[in-house]
Image (spheres, helix red, strand yellow):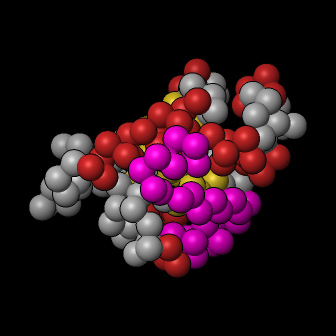
Amino acid sequence: MLLLNGPNLGVLGRREPEIYGTDTLADIEAAVAEEVRAQGWEVLSVQHDGEGDLVGAIHRHGESTVGAIVNPGALMIAGWSLRDALASYAPPWVEVHLSNVWARERFRHESVIAPLASGVVVGLGAFGYRLAARALLHLAAAPRHSPHSANGEVGGRTP
């Protein structure tokens, strides 16, 4: 399973703990690995501050992973190349945000990638990653999952 974390998430635990909590990225990686271990899954964790590096990771690991947890950080707002890369990622994936982005500044209220995700977990801190891992286990066990309809619509909307 791919665990993809975007800009500024490499300094979790130190960066604004009143918003993002005190768990480090290593703590989150360990929690996700524990969550999926019983199913024989391994976690490939990738964190980059640059959008191009995240896009490259999706392309490199798209065919070798069974699903992904994606925290794009602020790239949720205008990460168009990240969005395009995720549009070509066939396995299910879940967008995660530690904080409740809709309870924060208005510019954080829309994600350009969320319409493509199998689901979104927001505002539950580090525990949100565990929930996303559980969701991916469920989705992988279900018959072929695709959030996209044949005409390219996602959740009733055209992406």
Q: Which of these two is toward me, 64 or 146?
A: 64
**Is residue 48 part of the magenta span, yes or no?**
yes
Q: Quadrant of residue 46?
A: bottom right
Q: Quadrant of residue 51?
A: bottom right
Q: Residue furthest right?
A: 14
Residue 20 rendering spot, x and y as whole percentages: 72, 31
Q: Is residue 136 above or below residue 62?
A: above
User: Residue at 23% of width from left, 43% of height from top?
Assistant: 155
Q: Is residue 20 left or right of residue 14?
A: left
Residue 94 rendering spot, x and y as whole percentages: 43, 46
Q: Which residues are magenta?
A: 32-58
Q: How many marks?
A: 0
**Is residue 93 part of the magenta span, yes or no?**
no
Q: Which of these two is toward me, 120 or 66?
A: 66
Q: Is any part of residue 44 visible from this angle?
A: yes
User: Residue at 38% of width from left, 40% of height from top?
Assistant: 135
Q: Is any part of residue 96 visible from this angle?
A: no
Q: Which of these two is toward me, 101 or 107?
A: 101
Q: Is residue 12 above or below residue 18?
A: below
The C terminus - image quarter: bottom left
Q: Is residue 72 above or below residue 96?
A: below
Residue 150 rendering spot, x and y as whole percentages: 12, 61
Q: Is residue 22 left or right of residue 44?
A: right
Q: Which of these two is toward me, 67 or 89?
A: 67
User: Residue at 23% of width from left, 55% of height from top?
Assistant: 146
Q: Is residue 20 left or right of residue 40?
A: right
Residue 37 rendering spot, x and y as whole percentages: 51, 49
